Every structure is written in structure tokens, then in C-alpha cells.
Amino acid sequence: MRVPFTKMHGLGNDFVMLDARERTLPPVTGPVAAALADRRTGIGCDQLILLQPASADAPGADFRMRIFNSDGSEVQSCGNAARAVALLHGSDAAVETAGGTIRVSPRDAGAEVDMGAPRFDWDDIPLAYAMDTAAMPVGWPYAGGTMHNPAAVNVGNPHVVFFVEDAYAVPLAEVGPDIETDALFPERINVNVASVSSGELTLRVWERGTGLTRACGTGACATAVAAIRRGLVQSPVTVHLPGGALTIAWQQGGTIMMTGPAQTAFTGSFEWEDFA
Ligand SMILES: N[C@@H](CCC[C@H](N)C(=O)O)C(=O)O
């Protein structure tokens, strides 16, 4: 079966988008997603995004967005892909995700997304045992220092956020995998390392199931929320990632608004049987 795809990205966090809203595709399994995501033998992407009709669990949603990391794991949320979906869809939409229904609105060369309300309870993250998620009494050493007292936030998917002097001085490719797979995080975790300067955030992210990416939209949301809670920055805040900047707005008790760019890179098609 010949299947069309659209290759898109948000700040260099790239996606293969499969649109099954008006056509039927065979089941996308973890191994199929990982094969398509492979940068040498597949199309190549950080995440595979599958659009389908909304399920009965999300009555108000216009359609459903499923997210697979490049390792094949299916996850709850993807901020940068949400903006790409807005661009692909072309108008405002309520989008069902495993992390909750989000609202996307195309804007200029990107989108504004209401990502929903963050959650802070230890078992919402989830953590393996109870602790204060605003300043966790844990730390991880690395060659050159120790990262300690992170915050944990669930913004549809789980994030741990470390505030450090210089986000670019942390060897994230070395320390990221250890933290991602630490027993404290039973569903693994996305690892954010951020620094604060002139009221803005500089952020690098080791993504669960993918590794270092040029940008992580949910990471920017989680980091902005954690920084606002700690009084380090005020809403709205600019978050600088390796691939560019996002604007995140959040008030205590409210939902998170993310604004930023998204782009189509190219379209193509592939033989399903080559990857199944
Ligand atoms: N790149 C994404 C996040 C993708 C999912 C994440 N790796 C997870 O496992 O939760 C974003 O822009 O938010």
C-alpha cells in the first residue's frame, strides 16, 4: 500500500505526519513507527504523528493526534507537533491526545496552542514515591558538577526541570539517559536543563524516547511553569531552545498557552510493507 506523508517541524523538532482521518491505514505499531523514524533506513524524524478520527472518549474533539517517539514508544503529548498539526489542519481545532484535549489555532507562520492545565502531584508526574515536586530533594552528579532540587511537572507528558547556571555547560547527552531511566520515574521522563537571564529562559531538552532535540514544546511549557512557580520569571516568558524561541504564558490555576512557528519541509509517499 502506497501511503502519503508530510514531513514537518517546529523549531527543528521534526515529524513524519500520517493523516488517517479520511483513509484507513494498517495499525501503526511501535516497530513501524521506529522504522519510519530511522534517519538512515527510514524517512527520519524525532516523532511520528498519526492523525485519526476522534475517539468516543473525547466527545468535543475534532480529531485525534497520536504521538510516537523515534524509539517506537507511544506517548501523551507533543507541543511542537501540536503547532505543526494546526498548520496542516488549517483552522482552529480541538485535538484529542492521550494527555488530554488541546486547542490549536494557526497564527501567521505557526500556531497558538492551549496545552491545558499543568499537574504537580507526585503521582500525576508520575514519581515512584511521594515528594514535593516544586523542589525535589534529589540530585544527579555529572563530570563538572551536580544538578539538584529539580521541579517535576506533567503537561500532558512528564517532565523534570533543572535550573542551572549555564544550560549549555551541562553534558546533557551523558546525564540525560541516566535521569530519563531512573527508577524514580516509572514511565521514564523528559529531562529539561534551563538557565535564567534577563527574565527569559534558555533551555535544552533530553527527550524521553528520542534523545537530544533542537526543541521540545512541552519541555518549554513545563520549564516556564516551573520557573514561574519559583518566581524566577514572569508570564509570558520567552524560552530560547537550540532551534529557536517559543512564548509561553501561564497564570496559577490556568491553562498553558504556547505560541511559536511550525513549517512543512516536504511531502512524499512510501510503501507500507517496506516498514511493517
Ligand atoms: N518533542 C515533543 C515531545 C515529544 C514526546 C516526548 N519525547 C515524551 O516522550 O513525552 C514536544 O515538542 O513537546
Image (cartoon, helix red, strand yellow):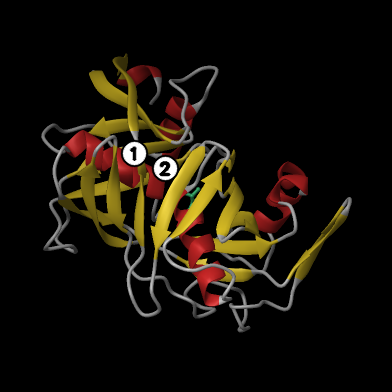
Residue 45 seen anywhere in this rendered image of the structure: yes
Which numbered disc flags the more N-terminal residue, 2 or 1? 1
In the rendered image, the vertical position of residue 146 relative to residue 208, given as above or below:
below
Q: Which residue is mark 2?
A: 68
List the residue tagged with mark 1. Answer: 49
Count of marks overlaid on the render: 2
Q: 2 or 54: which is nearer to us? A: 54
Q: Amino acid at mark 1?
A: Ile
- Residue 23: % across, % down: 13, 31
Q: Residue at x 56, y 50 (%)?
A: 208
The quarter of the displayed image where residue 151 is located: bottom right
Residue drawn at x 74%, y 52% is 166
Q: Quadrant of residue 91?
A: top left
Q: Three-letter amino acid code at disc 2?
A: Phe
Label 2 neighbour load within 10 Å: few <14, some 14-19, many 20+? many
Which residue is depicted at the point 11% across and 35% down? 22
Label 1 sits on a secondary structure element that is: strand
- Residue found at x 67% / y 62%: 162
Q: Nearer the viewer, residue 33 or 236?
A: 236
Give the side of residue 4 with respect to residue 155, left or right.
left
Q: Do tag 2 and tag 1 residues touch (Cβ < 8 Å)?
A: yes
Q: Is mark 2 within 8 Å of ligand 1?
A: no
